[in-house]
Image (tube, helix red, strand yellow):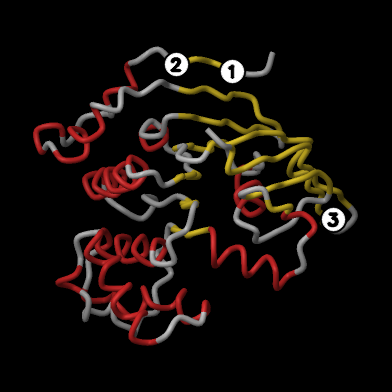
Amino acid sequence: MMALIQARGLTKVYAMGDQTVHALRGVSLDIEEGGFVAIMGASGSGKSTLMNILGCLDLPTEGQYRLADEPVEQMAPDQLASIRNRRIGFVFQQFNLLPRTSAVENVELPMVYAGVKAADRRARAMEALSHVGLAQRASHTPSELSGGQQQRVAIARALVNKPQLILADEPTGALDSQTSEDIMRLLTELNAQGMTVVLVTHESDIAAWARRKIVFRDGHVVEDSTVVVPQAVIPDLIRDPSMHGTAPPWIAGQARNDSPA
């Protein structure tokens, strides 16, 4: 399968007063199209810096990054904005919804920036809300929605431009355990339909839903492990109510550890 993300020797250096901070130190990795990857690490480990680079929100100090074979590190700001809008959907911990705007209007926003016609925007936004089970809440503002419903609106917004990649930064951090599980089931379903999902989390039980885990420490990858998932189990995990409250069935499987020595 083709690598959607190709990173080679990514280094990011920040100047903080008289100090130089090395947030990333020569990170190289590939993420295949259709992958489901969790990026973990303590505060200051480099995981958020990597997420910003993968999301075309920042550029590396050194190194190469290709997204869908486009050389991102050479792009100007307007080109970065274009590739974000075309190829990436973002999901954040705090939802980032406009408070006085309806769910469907929040979902329409990325299409406004993309220049999609108004009639098409509304139809596509409603389709995205239906996909996450919230079509009946389309006219509600964020204050009229639960936390889990707000995150579903945010996921619909991330999907509406039909991106190749979903980047989720602590997507369950503001949710209770049952709602967190519901959101992870939705991300698992999207991944089963072919969407590439990369999430940043500090919670091991959330990372366990992914099929690959990459752990950062001091700007380096210190663990990279994958689990082979029988595709037949995924629909049951997503839809079977009797499995609610249980871990994904592949967690108990044998991981193939690719950690650097």
- In the shown orientation, is residue 239 left or right of residue 36? left
Residue identified by numbered label 3 = 15
State if disc 2 and disc 1 touch (CB < 8 Å).
no
- Mark 2: which secondary structure? loop
The picture places residue 82, in percent across and down from the top left corner, at 62, 69
Residue visible at 35% across and 80% down?
120
- Mark 1: which secondary structure? loop
Q: Is residue 34 above or below residue 154?
A: above
Quadrant assignment, res 147: bottom left
Q: Is residue 103 above or below residue 13?
A: below
Q: Residues within 10 Å of mark 3 (few under 14, many from 20)?
A: few
Residue 255: mark in rendering: 2
Q: Earlier in the sequence, mark 2 or mark 3?
A: 3
Residue visible at 70% across and 68% down?
79
* Amino acid found under the numbered disc labelled 1: Asp
Q: CA distance from mark 1 to mark 3?
A: 33 Å
- In the shown orientation, is residue 242 left or right of residue 31? left
- Mark 3: which secondary structure? strand
Q: Is residue 189 above or below residue 155?
A: above
Q: CA distance from mark 1 to mark 2?
A: 9 Å
Q: Earlier in the sequence, mark 1 or mark 3?
A: 3
| Label 1 vs label 3, nearer the camera | 1
Residue identified by numbered label 1 = 258
Residue visible at 36% across and 60% down?
155
